[in-house]
Image: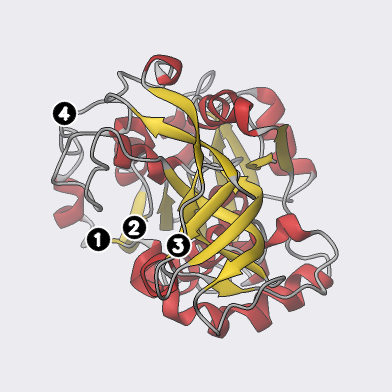
C-alpha cells in the first residue's frame, strides 16, 4: 500500500456536531517503517466516546490532547502488511490503537497492539464482546463496583457499547439491572434483548423518581455519563453503595471542567465509595478476562448490536452518531 488516506485534527471541535469543520481527510505516501514499527491494513475502526478527549485542548483529562495537525487516533482492527517487529508477522489479524486511516503505523508496546483470535466468527466481536468495551464492562461491574448476586446495579448510557455489555455482565453475575437510556426504542432494546429488570428513559421520565422504586436502594452504579444522571442516582443509592465511573459523556462536548455533583453530600450520608477507572489501567490483563467473556459469548449470554458505517470517508458521520446517542450498541466503521 503506497498511498494512505488519513483523518487529521485541524482544530478543537466545539460540541459534538462540529467535526466536519475540525477534521479533514488527507492522502500521503506511506513512509518506510522504522525499527519496531508495524503497519496495519485497517479493516475496521472502533468509534469510542473517550477519544473525544483527544480532540480537546484540556490537559487535565485522563489522557493528553492530540497536537493540532496530528493524525486522529482510535482503536483499529486489521491485518499486518509490513512489520519491523517479529512478534507481529505479516498477515496476522491485530487490534490496537492506531490512526483513523487506510493503513495505521504503530509501535506495538505504545499502542496495546495484540494478535487476536481468528476463530471468532464475527471479527467485529474483537471490538464487542471480546474487546476493550467488554473488558471495561467486566472490570467495572465485577471489580470496581463489586456487584454481587441479588444486588441492584444501575447502568447509564445503557444502550451504548460499554453500557449494554455492563448490563449483561451484571445479569450474568446474578444482579438485578436498571438500564438508563434515551428514548423508547433504546428502552425496548434493554428490556427485550438484554433482559434488564427496569429501563428508564431519561428523555421522557423522572430518573430519580423511577429509581426511588428500587427496593432498598441502588447497590452499585456503572456510570458512563456523569452530570444530572449521576445526581439522580446518588440520591437513590443504598448505604455502602459503590459507583464505578467509566465515562463522563455529559461533559465531553465542552472544554470547560464539569461541575461537581449537586448531590455530592450523599457520598458521606450514605457512606458511598466512588472510583474512576480507565482501559489503559488494565490492558495487560486482557488475556485474563477472555476465557469468561468467550464462554458467555459462545453461550449466548453476551451479545452486541453493531451500528456499522461503510468507508473511511464516512467516519465523521459514524462518530457523531455515537456521541449524540443516535446509535444502539457498538458503532464501527468498515473500510
- Residue drawn at x 48%, y 54% is 98
- Residue drawn at x 41%, y 40% is 72
Residue depth check, mark 1 versus mark 2: number of the one nearer the observer: 2
The numbered dot on residue 256 is 4
Q: Residues within 10 Å of mark 4 (few under 14, many from 20)?
A: few
The residue indicated by pointer 1 is 272
Q: CA distance from mark 2 to mark 3?
A: 35 Å
- Residue drawn at x 49%, y 73% is 142
The mark nearer the N terminus, 4 or 2, is: 2
Q: CA distance from mark 4 to mark 1?
A: 27 Å
Quadrant housing the C terminus: top right
Mark 2 secondary-structure assignment: strand
Q: 75 left or right of 21?
A: right
Q: Are marks 4 and 1 in contact (CB under 8 Å)?
A: no
Q: Are marks 3 and 4 in contact (CB under 8 Å)?
A: no
Residue depth check, mark 2 versus mark 3: number of the one nearer the observer: 3
The residue indicated by pointer 2 is 243
Q: Is residue 238 visible?
A: yes
How has the structure been colored for display?
A: secondary structure
Q: CA distance from mark 1 to mark 2?
A: 8 Å
The mark nearer the N terminus, 3 or 4, is: 3
Frontmost residue, 265 versus 202? 202
Q: Tell me which corner region of the image, top left, top right, bottom left or bottom right, holds residue 182.
A: top right
The residue indicated by pointer 3 is 106
- Residue drawn at x 25%, y 33% is 68
Amino acid at each position: 500500500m503506497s498511498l494512505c488516506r488519513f483523518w487529521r485534527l485541524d482544530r478543537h471541535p466545539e460540541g459534538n456536531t462540529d467535526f466536519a469543520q475540525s477534521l479533514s481527510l488527507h492522502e500521503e505516501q506511506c513512509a518506510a517503517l522504522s525499527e519496531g514499527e508495524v503497519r496495519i491494513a485497517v479493516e475496521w475502526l472502533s468509534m469510542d466516546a473517550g477519544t473525544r478527549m483527544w480532540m480537546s485542548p484540556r490537559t487535565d483529562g485522563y489522557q493528553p490532547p492530540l497536537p493540532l495537525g496530528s493524525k486522529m487516533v482510535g482503536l483499529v482492527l486489521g491485518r499486518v502488511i509490513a512489520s519491523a517487529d517479529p512478534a507481529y508477522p505479516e498477515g496476522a489479524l491485530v487490534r490496537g490503537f492506531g490512526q483513523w486511516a487506510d493503513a495505521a503505523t504503530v509501535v506495538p508496546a505504545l499502542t496495546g497492539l495484540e494478535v487476536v483470535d481468528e476463530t471468532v466468527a464475527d471479527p467485529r466481536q474483537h471490538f464487542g464482546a471480546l474487546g476493550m468495551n467488554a473488558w471495561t464492562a467486566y472490570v467495572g461491574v465485577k471489580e470496581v463496583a463489586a456487584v454481587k448476586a441479588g444486588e441492584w446495579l444501575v447502568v447509564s448510557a445503557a444502550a451504548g457499547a460499554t453500557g449494554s455489555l455492563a448490563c449483561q455482565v451484571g445479569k450474568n453475575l446474578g444482579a438485578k439491572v436498571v438500564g438508563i437510556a434515551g428514548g423508547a426504542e433504546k428502552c425496548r432494546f434493554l428490556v427485550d434483548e438484554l433482559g434488564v429488570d427496569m429501563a428508564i428513559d431519561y428523555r421522557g421520565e423522572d430518573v430519580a423518581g423511577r429509581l426511588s422504586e428500587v427496593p432498598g436502594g441502588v447497590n452499585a452504579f456503572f456510570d458512563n455519563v456523569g452530570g444530572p444522571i449521576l445526581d439522580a442516582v446518588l440520591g437513590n443509592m443504598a448505604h455502602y453503595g459503590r459507583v464505578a465511573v467509566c465515562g463522563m459523556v455529559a461533559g465531553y462536548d465542552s472544554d470547560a471542567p464539569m461541575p461537581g455533583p449537586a448531590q455530592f453530600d450523599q457520598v458521606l450520608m450514605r457512606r458511598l465509595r466512588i472510583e474512576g477507572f480507565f482501559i489503559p489501567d488494565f490492558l495487560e490483563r486482557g488475556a485474563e478476562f477472555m476465557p469468561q467473556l468467550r464462554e458467555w459469548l459462545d453461550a449466548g449470554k453476551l451479545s452486541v448490536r453493531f451500528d456499522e458505517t461503510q468507508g473511511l470517508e464516512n467516519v465523521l458521520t459514524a462518530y457523531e452518531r455515537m456521541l449524540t446517542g443516535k446509535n444502539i450498541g457498538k458503532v464501527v466503521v468498515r473500510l
